[in-house]
Amino acid sequence: MVRTPLTPEERLRGERLGVLLRAARGERSMAAVAASAGISAETLRKIETGRAPTPAFFTVAALAGALGLSLDEILGRCAAEPAVAPAPVPAAVPLIA
């Protein structure tokens, strides 16, 4: 099976996820957090270092629970930022007769 290469945005999102998880882990050991989430310490290490930038949903959900993060917070902090801000919508101009 051939994997589709990740886009730069996917890689960046994975890096953001790793930084967020590492910060949330704080002083706790990688092994303790991984065990609490039901994953291996090596899996957590790969996610935190960006070597596994697209972990499975249930892996992320388990880590969120173990670290006291909400999935909404993870999404908000890891989602790609828009490349260009959307243009403002002009207000309706009344027609003068």
Image: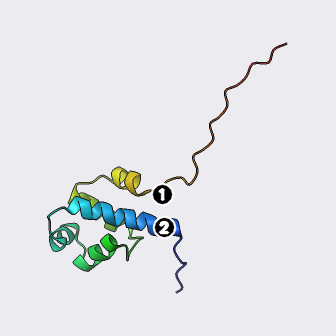
Q: Which amino acid, by three-letter code, is at mark 1?
A: Ala
Asked whether 35 or 51 is in front, the reply is: 51
**Amino acid bearing label 2:** Glu
Looking at the image, residue 87 lies above or below residue 75: above
Residue 24 sits in quarter:
bottom left
Residue 57 locus on image (x, y percent): 38, 65
Q: Earlier in the sequence, mark 2 or mark 1?
A: 2
Residue 91 picture quarter: top right
For residue 10, the mark is 2
Q: What residue is rendered at 38% in x and 69% in y?
A: 56
Q: Is residue 4 left or right of residue 45?
A: right
Q: Secondary structure at mark 2?
A: helix
- Kindly identify the residue that appears in the image at 15 percent across and 70 percent down: 29
* Residue 31 image point, x, y percent: 17, 74
What is the crowding at mark 2: few (fewer than 14 residues within 10 Å), some, or many (at least 20)? some
Q: Classify residue 27 as left or right of residue 61.
A: left
Question: Seen in the image, is 34 located left or right of residue 18?
Answer: left
- Circle 1 SS class: loop
Q: Which mark is residue 80?
A: 1
Residue displayed at 39% across by 67% down: 15
